[in-house]
Image (cartoon, helix red, strand yellow):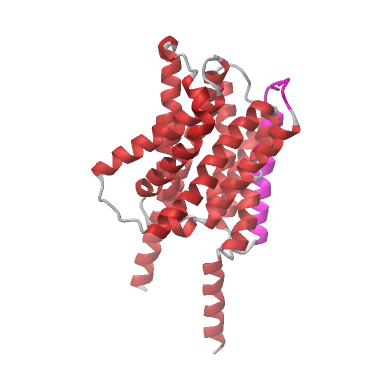
Amino acid sequence: MLTFAIKFTAMEDKNFKGHAALFTAYFIFGLNTPVSKAVLAEGGTSPLALTFFRFAGAAALFWLATLFVKKEQVCRRDLFLFFVASMFGILINQMSFIVGLSMASPIDASVITTTVPILTMILAAFFLREPITWKKAGGVLTGATGALLLIFNGNPVHSGSANRMGDWLCVLSCAAFALYLTAFKKLILRYSAITSMKWMFLYATIVSLPFCWHDVASVPYAALPPDRIIRIAYVVVLATFVSYLLIPTGQKSLRPTVVSMYNYLQPLVSSAVAVVAGMDVFGWSKGIASLLVFLGVYLVTQSKSRAQLEAELQRRETTDI
């Protein structure tokens, strides 16, 4: 009994760290939305250039961080798996979304991002044999309802360049990230966050260079004002390096569907920023939406995993005997 209590306490502590890491990462992501929009709206820095800054900047920071941690050996097979994981979790996810956002309306893009937990739940059932319970499905849909309520009750943003190709690129971004969370969970478990991310961002930087070079070379670096440099630094250091350092911590201790549920925190944070900045007001709809988002996350965290269901079945069989 004492051993079980110690293990349970350790597991709860690990889960708390995972939730804290994800909350911090997606809070930063939420702030990144208005910051990135400000950088792009000011001109001089294209979506592809900003994305490459994220890849190359994060890669440099993660490789620099390896000087201060214990070195891990990565086998050749896992180096290849990191390449594939990088294509889905970073390159396709970020590049297709930023290009899609430039073509689609912000409202469409925000709505499409709410599909990430739904796709993750389905893919987790396929790759990890995680059960789709009523509580888990209900939590995902509850969180999606709250996120959509926030999106549709915010200030409308019009875009004259909206088209279906942009929508499909945003869908591709969501599907790629959901696949990354589920198909590569075991790979992420084998290594530290720094080891995983240094290889993944290095691969993303190399592969994206031919597509982004023209935009990167066209940036008027000498004419960039200090405030825009600070915004770009936020995107690279906090919204990429720090956030992607924290996400694997959550992946190690929490199920993919739980990790993906924190995606609903982004519109919540963005909405709060708009209220604080005086661009929006906090009304009853935002209050209800916020409660639905947190209720959805709670329901998913309370749903039972495959391991828990198997343990319960084994206990029942032992009791029957």
Q: How many marks?
A: 0
Q: Position of residue 115 (x, y in %)?
A: 66, 45
Locate residue 317 relative to residue 18 in the image: left or right.
Answer: right
User: Vertical placement of 273 versus 77: above or below?
Assistant: above
User: Vertical placement of 129 versus 91: above or below?
Assistant: below
- Report the residue at 51% width, 73% height from top: 311
Q: Nearer the viewer, residue 112 or 156?
A: 112
Q: Position of residue 229 (x, y in %)?
A: 42, 18
Magenta-colored span: 133-162
The reply to whether residue 45 is visible in this rendering is yes
- Report the residue at 45% width, 51% height from top: 82
Q: Quadrant of the rendered structure where residue 112 is?
A: top right
Question: For residue 150: magenta?
Answer: yes
| Image quadrant in which the C terminus is located | bottom right
Q: Nearer the viewer, residue 46 or 142?
A: 46
Question: For residue 203: magenta?
Answer: no
Locate residue 81 relative to residue 275 in the image: left or right.
Answer: left
User: Vertical placement of 71 versus 271: above or below?
Assistant: below
- Report the residue at 45% width, 32% height from top: 54
Q: Position of residue 97 (x, y in %)?
A: 60, 35
The reply to whether residue 252 is visible in this rendering is no
Q: Position of residue 263 (x, y in %)?
A: 57, 41
Q: Quadrant of the rendered structure where residue 237 is?
A: top left
Locate residue 158 relative to residue 73 in the image: left or right.
Answer: right
Q: Main secondary structure of the magenta part?
A: helix
| Image quadrant in which the N terminus is located | bottom left
